[in-house]
Amino acid sequence: MIVITNSNVTEERIGEIVLHIEKAGVQAHVSRGTDRTVIGIIGKAEPTLAEHLRQMKGVENVIKISKSYKLASRDFHPDDTVIEIKGVKMGGEHLVVMGGPCAVETPEQIDEIARLVKAAGGQVLRGGAFKPRTGPYSFQGIGVEGLAMMAEAGKKHGLLTITEVMTPEYVDVCAEYADILQVGTRNMQNFDLLRKLGTIQTPVLLKRGFSATYDEFLNAAEYILAGGNPNVMLCERGIRTFETYTRNTLDLAAIPVLQSLSHLPVISDPSHGTGRRELVEPMSKASVAAGANGLIIEMHTDPDNSMTGDGVQSLFPDQFANLLKELEQLGKLVGRRFDTPKQTADYFTSWIK
């Protein structure tokens, strides 16, 4: 259930309502919007609780939520969630771009790419230190050493960092180095990992499983939210269909659908969503036009020799820079804007030469 309070209710009265809810043996989660305060009730409540709450001073309405995901539901949190990390805002009208290689390879590689991401106007440096691979003999990442390399590059160039975490045991160490933790498609329903991520406050980018429904996706996010971490972003990264031309099928409809069902920011991954470099640019633009709050894009200075073998879906630095320039203009048309100023394009001129 959710309790909707009157617009003029006092904080003291909200506290009294919360206390009444908790005395009934259920949890109360307060969400303050621009016009109303919504109190979500999580747990099995007695039928009489709703009637008692309706009669309380300051309560405008009590509504039963039929969705299995309560905290992720827009019913519980009518306003868009905006996550702010070191001045960078994600969600609402803000457009964030995360760029970088599939995997951290060397200090020189990640430093150069960080410089190029910053110069293009990107706000977040992406890179994997631990890589979940389908085959056991594929490159698995360089581990904690890679986390340190990326953290140093991000700090040097004024970028946030995002990296994938694969197991509950590595959550704390990854959170020590990275600003955002990514849950990959294969781990969307790794419930032990999701529960652990709920115990920290580091923002989480949760990727949709390649065969997951919207309901399953939002219930996975609910695990993190229910654990106490409100900083969750949803990432559409493509689903598995019968089509073999592209690596996956990027579900653009997921962007407006998820935004109608949930208040959480929605990020699009056109790199994994297509697996083809020539499709990343048009699908990035299509994602922003569909209302995405951000993009996570693979970019590499030498994609042909990428250690992960995913270079075919990585943009070259000049392609990345041109794309962000065009996205800035497109964003204005659909109510999205970048928050960080771009530097000069000298880096790209020198790189091309």
Image: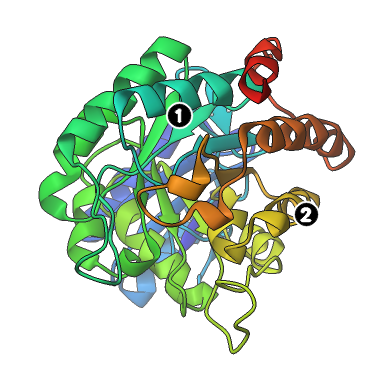
**Mark 2 is on which residue type?**
Pro
Secondary structure beneath dot 2 equals helix
The x and y percentages for residue 296 are 55, 45
**Mark 1 is on which residue type?**
Glu
Report the front residue among 59 and 113: 113
Query: In the rendered image of this protein, does residue 16 appear above or below residue 11?
Result: below
Secondary structure beneath dot 1 equals helix
Residue found at x 29% / y 64%: 133
The x and y percentages for residue 244 are 60, 82
What is the quadrant of the C terminus in the image?
Answer: top right
Residue found at x 66% / y 36%: 320
Query: In the rendered image of this protein, does residue 9 appear above or below residue 348?
Result: below
Q: Quadrant of residue 193?
A: bottom left
What is the residue that sits farthest to the left in this orientation?
A: 169
For residue 61, the mark is none
Query: Mark 2 or mark 1: which comes first in sequence?
Result: 1
Q: Nearer the viewer, mark 2 or mark 1?
A: 2
What is the residue that sits farthest to the front in this orientation?
A: 353
Residue underneath mark 1: 11
What is the quadrant of the N terminus in the image?
Answer: bottom left
Residue found at x 41% / y 41%: 231
What is the residue that sits farthest to the bottom in this orientation?
A: 242
The x and y percentages for residue 302 are 50, 39
Q: CA distance from mark 2 to mark 1?
A: 48 Å
Query: In the rendered image of this protein, does residue 62 appear above or below residue 119?
Result: below
For residue 282, the mark is 2
Whether residue 85 appears in this view of the structure is: no
Residue found at x 63% / y 85%: 243
Q: How is the image coloured?
A: rainbow
